[in-house]
Amino acid sequence: MGLGVNLRETIGFYAPWLVLAPLACGWKLRRRELLIVGASCLVFALLAFGWFGYWFITDPHYRHIWYGWRESMREESGRHPVELANLKPFFVYLFITAPVVFLSIPLVIRNEWKRRHLTPMLALWMVALFADVLLFFNYSTTVNWRYFLTGLPGLAPLGAYWLLSLGVRFLGETRRAFVACVLVIVGFATAFSLFIRPVSSDFIQRRAMSKDYKDRLQQVPADAVMISGAQTIAVTYWAAIGSGRWETIGTGGGWPGDRLFAVVNDYFAKGKRVFIDSDPRWWLPCGWQRDEIPLITQLEQHFRFRRVTDSIFELRPLTDNSAQDHPNLKRLLPENRPEDTRRCPTRP
């Protein structure tokens, strides 16, 4: 669990399991048991925060990225403040993520406690529900339902047990109840796949473009620095597997903010060549990039440009009179793209 926190920090919400699970398994509050529980929590804390501390102290680039992530979190939280109105999307998204689990929430804890009191399965369910409840205080929950997958692994077992018990009560046989449960789950999955298809297909198509982004990267030097907006992760991926040595001026958590122009000049001082991909598909006027696009347009005031392809331009110092192309970055501004802003999710 501690190592998992470094992959996805919300795993840390499961920390109460280390304390609650021994009680559910019948442990008594004696000195030996308390020492073992305390030791498990210590190991968790060391593995969860130790590596973060190591990277933060030893790697200046990691510190820069972390501060950028904190700043982007602050800005997004300002756009999606925690308020009672967020309860509606909170429950809607939890229902979309796992409808059967959601419908079972009012019943499973009472039924399980009445039958067998605190069991390991009930303890896991309580910890997972606690993890999902904490998500209410995270701005991302109001715009993205995938975060509810945090609690799903712990909520699903007891929800499945309740659904099977309900089937046995009405059908009188475990085999029939199991078949009925499978049909219910398949029915929900089919209905929701049709319901969210317009949203998911657009998201999937945009992510699929990362596969072909390697072809664009072949148009620039193998050690170039790319400003690629939503395709930053594609640049990082292709570089990581050895297709090139590209670096990025990232989006979201890695965005330098007002330091953008200084960062570009720093790369120039190191002899690096910097390129921007101005394809509007990579600069969506929603979320993080809504605040990044105005700075992108200001690049035209600080640098000259040389065209490489229809959308890729090399940034050059103002002293380079040979670079006379105009990328027209203002076309990326939200007010110049009404067809894209209409697709932005609205705050509840």
Image (cartoon, helix red, strand yellow):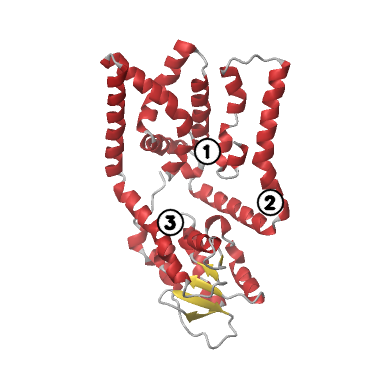
Rendered location of residue 257, percent (x, y): 58, 62
Mark 3 or 2: the one toward you: 2
Viewer-proximal residue, 6 or 175?
A: 175
Query: Mark 2 — residue?
Result: 55
Position of residue 52 measured from the top left corner of the image (x, y, whole percent) = 66, 46
Q: Secondary structure at mark 2?
A: helix
Which residue is the site of mark 3? 286
Vertical placement of residue 108 versus 79, above or below: above
Vertical arrangement, residue 291 with respect to residue 108, above or below: below
Q: Whole-Å distance between the Cαs marked 1 and 3?
A: 21 Å
Q: Quadrant of the C terminus?
A: top left
The kind of residue on which mark 1 rests is Phe
Residue 255 seen in the figure: yes
Nearest to N terminus: mark 1 or mark 2: 2
**Which secondary structure lies at badge 3?**
loop
Q: Residue at x 41, y 69 (%)?
A: 279
